[in-house]
Amino acid sequence: MAEPIRAEGLVRRFGDITAVDGIDLAINEGEIYGFLGPNGAGKSTCVRMLVTLLTPTAGKAYVAGFDVVSDANMVRANIGVALQDAAIDPLMTGRELLRLQAVLHGIGKSEGEERSERLLDRVGLTDAADRRVGQYSGGMRRRLDLALALMHEPNVLFLDEPTTGLDPMSRLNLWEELRRLNTELGTTVFLTTQYLEEADELAHRIGIIDDGKIVREGDTGTLKEQVGCPTLRLDVDPEHVEATMEIACKFGEPRPSRSGRVAVGLEQGASAMTELLRLLDDRGIVVQHLELDEPSLDDVFAEATGRRLEGSSEHVAGEIAEDGSAGAEGLIP
Amino acid sequence: MTSVEVSQDISRSPRTFTLQSAALSYRAIVRFFRQPAAWVPGIFFPLMLLAVNSASMGRVADIPGILPPGTSFLMYLIPAVVIQGVLFGGIAGGSEMARDIQTGFFDRLLSSPVARPAILIGRLAGSMAFGAFLAVLFQLVAWPFGGDVIGGLAGRLVLVVVAVILSLAMGALAAGIAARTAQEETVQAFFPLVFILLFLSSCFFPIVLMSGWYQTVAEYNPLTFMADGMRYQVLYGFSWSEAGKAIGVASILAVLGLVFASAQIRYRIRNAS
């Protein structure tokens, strides 16, 4: 199969609002592609077009080799979909829903029953299979949702924020299951998430979407390398924040940071930290706490969009620097 | 387990379409009966009206020429409570559809290769099953209190058939509203209108005892045609022509309802956000 997911100039407008603004995608077979972006960036709208729930305003998209508009039924037959907020009927049991899913995909009764049992076992819901879904925990619902999406053994799996609202243990379990699926079956996974850690852990390649556009794309290692230098974060007395920023900026570009903290990308690498600390000491500035971080996906996101994804109320370092106040106040969320 | 590439459009297969419709119908029926709040009012309120109206207006039967000899006002009311229950059930079915849209289950169906008409058929099956259930239940409840059906088994069957077709009509209308608005509250707000329509008909009171505009509206109200056709089976005996009249009017409403619902579901699919 050629690229299981391909999009060319995909656009979706709602009245005057452009939710998705000319997206190109080329996702390889067996790849886990992480689609990362804040709420309202256009992730779900893009997924809804790819799974045929929404007609694109412009552009083309092909999933499993079929056009999402002219061959929508063929796309539906070849994809598994688990949308945001697991839409699972709370009045039905897990087993009833799996059998319904089997019929919807044209799977015969005995084969459907066999697959249901296998999937229930796979996602660890055999004991709860005859309980109504309304009695399931959030993690159990998500696992059932995944099992439903896998009933017809699809080539391509779309997961729209699959771990939103889950506790950490349920999230880890779901990640493990997704890795297993991808490794054992070679299923191509298109995963949207607003969690950096999730994208970092699972995705072979990441696309960062902001305001309906893909602003960065690549494998996580390359993206981090592109951001370049490590980030030094310093906590100082509030009255010294401005002076600290002034000194820090001699060693590199300021980075977004929380209130009362100065962050800078060290262009000469971690070795520049000693010199920076010496200059601060010369000015009588006491460093209360410091952290040195290698580039993270969060830095990639911030560099690409000017915002932090988790705790997005933080401001852009560059904007602050421009107002002449050495930035410290502007960096405060 | 390995990934499987599907190369045929299964939604065009008549066999798959039938199985999909049956599976979605099963879900609708199971869901409906697992929610007492959806069906208890449809049983309780009509039975309450049957008890209250037959007791308070029972002497209507004494007025010459209103009811045939040997019958009672309780018998007169049997078609009315069946229709009332069916209208309740239809609205409950429409609310279910709105809930499916709100919770995302509708999207789950749309992202699967299910034939689109199967979604509507499956949704309406719950309303139709409830309509049949009510028609049987109300006849059984009325029987020990003198609520016999002179038309016998054939007459009783007519009541069930009309109830099922009217359920289809009402369910389709409510499903159409649900598809358009995706709001349970809007579907339920439709209920008072239906209730007024019910009382502006011959369902609960003979038309000959009405007067003025009220009588005119009642004469042309489609519910009157259905109530009168069903009532003939109860009070006089089985009649093909009267059965045909009730079934015919119910069928016209069902066709109109289905056209409306199909159009609104197409609108929902086209304008999804």
Image: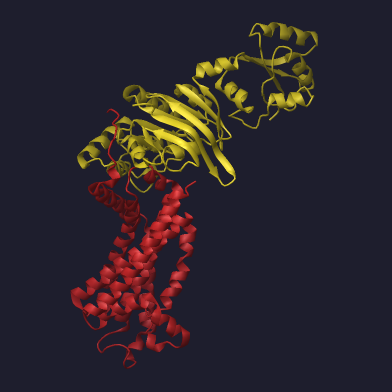
Chain colours: A yellow, B red
For the N terminus of chain A, give its image quadrant.
top left
| Left-right relation of B114 to B198 | left
Question: Residue pushed farthest left?
Answer: B153
Question: At 31% from the left edge and 65% from the top edge, which residue is drawn?
Answer: B131
Q: Nearer the viewer, residue A42 or B163?
A: A42
- Residue B253, horizontal then vertical, whole percent: 36, 68
Q: Is residue A83 visible?
A: yes
Q: Is residue B40 visible?
A: no
Vertical order, B81 against A330 (above or below)? below
Question: At 35% from the left edge and 27% from the top edge, which residue is drawn?
Answer: A187
Q: Nearer the viewer, residue A153 or A139?
A: A153
Asked where in the image residue B203 lies, by quadrant, the reply is: bottom left
Asked where in the image residue A3 lies, by quadrant, the reply is: top left
- Residue B112, horizontal then vertical, whole percent: 35, 42
| Left-right relation of B157 to A140 | left
For the C terminus of chain A, give its image quadrant.
top right
Question: At 58% from the left edge and 35% from the top edge, which residue is drawn?
Answer: A211
| Left-right relation of A99 to A321 | left
| Left-right relation of A306 to A86 | right
Vertical order, B44 against A38 (above or below)? below
- Residue A318, horizontal then vertical, whole percent: 70, 24
Asked where in the image residue A185 lies, by quadrant, the reply is: top left
Question: At 27% from the left edge and 78% from the top edge, which residue is drawn?
Answer: B145
- Residue B30, horizontal then vertical, whole percent: 31, 53
Count of numbered marks:
0
Vertical order, A87 against B135 (above or below)? above
Vertical order, B58 against A13 (above or below)? below
Q: Nearer the viewer, residue B3 or A148?
A: B3
